[in-house]
Image (cartoon, rainbow, N blue to C red):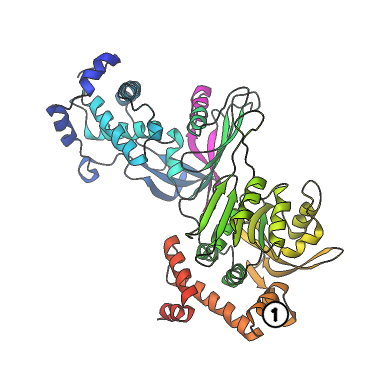
């Protein structure tokens, strides 16, 4: 077996040419799990009960969710195991590949698209490992998995980043198990650990460099966006985090949730969703509030699907999270300054003021926190339909925080806001579930700002009490305004809400939940609701 050399000049002549032996090597290394056997395996020990397992990178890695005797749920990433020879070999392969990629002018691999990255890296790995004529097929595939994971993905957390069920990832320091938030099991520990300060520091430094941001002992805190669009907060070193560098990742959903997902998961009822649909279509102004990770942005994205097709939409965010199926939509994000004096900084207030010159019919603001709230309420009062999110635990807290310093929106401007939707994280048998706690309408703005609840969630029965139905008898502010604007009778309004509810329930019953299909069905409903309902009922 020929040892791998680290002499760059020697490598250049060997790896820039393709030989017959290499072509033979490539033929031998067409991996077939049915013939060559599995790359990964896992058998839970007797003190573990496996609840679920699923692939995240078939055939290289999968996830096993287990429960211990102490009834604690754990998240285990199962990856290929390397023997002692393969461990030593892959260390050399990593070093040689760095030299080869640099020598051939492709050292900036992060700027190559994902398909070409993987193809290029596999080709170079084959060139390097072709020196080992006796290398088994499974050994090559196992080592290529780690090469790809460490060179073009996210290292130790790559499998977790591939898992669509994970919403958040937390690393609290060196020699501490990474924790994740799983949509089915809540916050649970994993078997992934950064074993040294150098390893963890190297990881967070690489993430900062990929995002084009600066991280150092002098600027040890960083908020940025990862290459896949996920948000990450990093603390570097031990000065401000005694356990070593740490990070918190908020995953970006590849496919956003639909209104049907939220109804199927009982975050909303179909009645509530039909109510929001009618309100969005008729240009009501809505704020979703709640604590961190209560589902505010998911609801904002889902409700945004109800905006009629071809309407002019402008969205404004600090980090890109809003995803809409509309064509006539401008997505804008803030940016930091390019110097210590914040020269060139563009904040939400700047974006909001600029957006008002773009003649939007709908304004969607990812989250309001400060002075941009005043501009937002000015936009509402000027007739622009707005939807946004805000950190608050109740409708009264929303009002108090908006109308008092440091935000200080004049109370009189609240007449333009129609609905406050309060979302919470509820717990049932130790499992976290997201629910809309209450939907409140702004009914009067005088000496005080008065609200009235249209929907309320009963935590004991897990049922949404539909107060909007009997509010129709005495005049729900929002529904009454819509009824008058449309020239409907009370029966017309009820019939329209029932049609929308039937439409949503029918799609769920037929298993139509994927994003593109839901968007198409909503568009068809806008064009011809009667025929669409007829098709769904057939």
Q: Residue furthest left?
A: 20
The residue positioned 57% from the left and 63% from the top of the image is 303
Q: Is residue 41 in sight in this rendering?
A: no
Position of the C terminus by quadrant: bottom left
- Mark 1 surroundings: few (<14), some (14-19) or many (≥20) residues within 10 A: some
Provide the residue designation for mark 1.
472
- Say whether residue 500 is left or right of residue 24: right
Position of the N terminus by quadrant: top left
The residue positioned 77% from the left and 57% from the top of the image is 399
Residue 264 drawn above or below residue 532: above
Region of the chain picked out in magenta, as a range: 176-204
The residue positioned 52% from the left and 52% from the top of the image is 183
Answer whether residue 472 is magenta in the image.
no
Between 298 and 529, the residue placed more toward the observer is: 529
- Say whether residue 151 is left or right of residue 194: left
Q: Is residue 263 in sight in this rendering?
A: yes
Image quadrant assignment for residue 425: bottom right
Answer whether residue 201 is magenta in the image.
yes
Residue 427 drawn above or below residue 439: above
Residue 350 at x, y percent in the picture: 65, 45
Q: Residue furthest front?
A: 357
């Amino acid at each position: 077996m020929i040892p791998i050399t680290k002499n760059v000049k020697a490598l250049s002549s060997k790896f820039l040419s393709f030989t017959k032996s290499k072509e033979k090597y490539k033929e031998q290394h067409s991996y077939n799990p049915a013939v060559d056997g599995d790359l990964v395996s896992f058998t839970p020990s007797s003190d573990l009960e496996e609840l679920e397992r699923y692939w995240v990178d078939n055939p290289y890695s999968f996830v096993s969710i287990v429960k211990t005797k102490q009834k604690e749920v754990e998240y285990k990433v199962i990856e290929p195991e390397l023997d002692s020879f393969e461990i030593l070999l892959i260390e050399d392969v990593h070093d040689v590949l760095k030299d080869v990629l640099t020598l051939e002018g492709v050292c900036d691999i992060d700027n190559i698209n994902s398909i070409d990255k993987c193809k290029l890296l596999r080709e170079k790995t084959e060139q390097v490992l072709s020196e080992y004529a006796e290398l088994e097929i499974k050994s090559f595939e196992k080592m290529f998995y780690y090469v790809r994971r460490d060179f073009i993905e996210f290292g130790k957390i790559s499998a977790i980043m591939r898992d669509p069920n994970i919403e958040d990832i937390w690393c609290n320091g060196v020699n501490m198990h990474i924790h994740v938030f799983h949509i089915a099991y809540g916050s649970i520990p994993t078997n992934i650990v950064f074993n040294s300060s150098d390893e963890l520091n190297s990881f967070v430094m690489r993430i900062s460099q990929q995002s084009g941001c600066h991280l150092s002992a002098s600027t040890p805190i960083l908020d940025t966006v990862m290459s896949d669009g996920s948000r990450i907060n990093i603390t570097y070193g031990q000065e401000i985090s005694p356990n070593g560098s740490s990070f918190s990742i908020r995953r970006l959903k590849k496919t956003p949730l639909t209104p049907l997902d939220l109804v199927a998961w009982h975050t909303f009822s179909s009645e509530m969703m039909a109510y929001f649909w009618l309100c969005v279509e008729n240009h009501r102004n809505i704020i979703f509030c709640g604590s961190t990770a209560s589902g505010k942005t998911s609801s904002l994205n889902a409700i945004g699907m109800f905006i009629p097709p071809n309407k002019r939409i402008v969205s404004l965010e600090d980090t890109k999270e809003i995803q809409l199926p509309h064509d006539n939509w401008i997505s804008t994000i803030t940016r930091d300054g390019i110097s210590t004096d914040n020269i060139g900084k563009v904040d939400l207030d700047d974006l909001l003021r600029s957006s008002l010159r773009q003649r939007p019919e709908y304004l969607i603001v990812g989250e309001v926190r400060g002075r941009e709230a005043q501009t937002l309420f000015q936009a509402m009062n000027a007739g622009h339909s707005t939807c946004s999110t805000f950190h608050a635990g109740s409708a009264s807290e929303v009002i108090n925080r908006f109308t008092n310093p440091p935000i200080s929106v004049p109370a009189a401007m609240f007449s333009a806001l129609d609905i406050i939707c309060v979302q919470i994280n509820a717990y049932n048998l130790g499992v976290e579930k997201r629910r809309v706690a209450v939907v409140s309408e702004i009914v009067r703005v005088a000496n005080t700002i008065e609200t009235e609840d249209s929907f309320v969630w009963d935590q004991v029965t897990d049922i949404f009490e539909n107060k909007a139905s009997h509010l129709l008898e005495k005049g729900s502010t929002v529904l009454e305004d819509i009824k008058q604007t449309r020239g409907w009778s009370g029966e017309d309004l009820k019939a329209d809400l029932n049609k929308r509810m039937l439409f949503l329930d029918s799609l769920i019953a037929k298993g139509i939940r994927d994003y593109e299909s839901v968007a198409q069905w909503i568009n068809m409903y806008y064009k011809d609701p009667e025929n669409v309902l007829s098709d769904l009922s057939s």
